[in-house]
Amino acid sequence: MTTGYGQQVAPSGPPPPAPKREGWTAGRTVVVVLGSLLSLVSLGLLAAGGAALWGDQTQRDNGYLSTNSAVFTTSGYALASNNVNLYGVGRSLLGTVRIRVTSTNGAPIFAGIAPANQLNSYLGSVQYATLDDFTNNHSAVTNHSGAAPTTVPATASIWSTKATGPGTQTLTWKVQDGNWTIVAMNADGSRGVSLRADVGVTVPWLIWAATGLLIAGAVLLIGGIVLIVVGIRRASYRSSSAPPAYPAT
């Protein structure tokens, strides 16, 4: 208002409220926490996708995801793997198995894959060892007492695939449903088996899994960052629309 002398006087009444800082409300805290959780999950997905992509790159370079080669020996007549149950998962998850076997005692070697029940019949009365871990040089084995096989392994009719001869022998086998066992013997069926072996497998779906994990991880990471930024910015926003304050008269 204006006085009779032309001086302006501030209006009477309480001063307007001071500008308020919009702080950390419960909703904004939840948004930032959710964004942080999404970011952490995304890092796990990206790491898994990167590992799958690395595995697929290994396949493109060498054809197979392989174990390290290891040396196995037995004083018996055969070395066999544990039974491998592929019912319902074999053809849907795996492609082709490759097994490379090299004799370390100079004897020609035999390697084959057979249905577990048929191989159990062939080795039922034979002295042999079962490998509990095909990837470890110092693997524990289970020894089975018995005698020499009645026929040399290559002549048996039980094998789904087989290879025999001097030097390195390579088996390739298209995965099939069933319960299977891998076995290695001296080609002439004699006792005292010593060999170096590795196992590889193709995984056709690996590139699709890698792509899906990377895409999902990237989407979650972007979403998490957006939520974190929005929550922090809103929590630190200062209102600039408050009217100016006048001193009380």
Image (cartoon, helix red, strand yellow):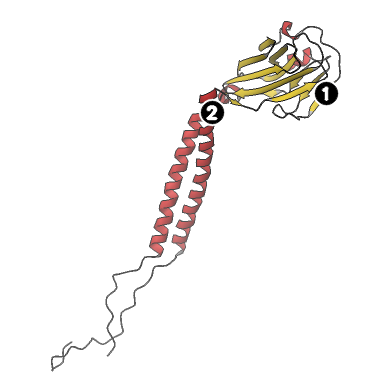
Residue beneath the point at 40% across and 52% down: 226
What is the tally of numbered marks visible in this picture? Answer: 2
Circles 1 and 2: CB distance less than 8 Å?
Answer: no
Q: Nearer the viewer, mark 1 or mark 2?
A: 2
Residue 118 lies, in percent from the top left, at 74, 13
Q: Is residue 86 left or right of residue 216?
A: right
Residue beneath the point at 26% across and 87% down: 12
- Nearer the observer, 72 or 117: 72
Name the amino acid type tagged 2. Answer: Thr
Q: Compared with residue 176, is residue 34 higher up or lower down, i.e. above or below?
A: below
Q: Quadrant of residue 227?
A: bottom left
Residue beneath the point at 45% across and 45% down: 220
Q: Indicate the secondary structure of the residue bearing disc 1.
A: strand
Residue 109 lies, in percent from the top left, at 72, 13
Residue assigned mark 1: 143
Separation (CA) of disc 1 from disc 2: 36 Å
Q: Indicate the secondary structure of the residue bearing disc 2.
A: helix
Q: Compared with residue 134, is residue 113 higher up or lower down, i.e. above or below?
A: above
Residue beneath the point at 47% across and 58% down: 30
Q: Is residue 103 left or right of residue 128?
A: left
- Nearer the observer, 110 or 178: 110
Residue assigned mark 2: 58
Residue found farthest to the front:
106
Name the amino acid type tagged 1. Answer: Asn
Q: Compared with residue 217, is residue 239 higher up or lower down, i.e. above or below?
A: below
Whichever of callouts 1 and 2 sits on the residue coming sooner in the sequence is 2
Residue 184 lies, in percent from the top left, at 73, 16
Mark 2 crowdedness (10 Å alpha carbons): few <14, some 14-19, many ≥20 = some
Mark 1 crowdedness (10 Å alpha carbons): few <14, some 14-19, many ≥20 = some
Q: Quadrant of residue 162?
A: top right
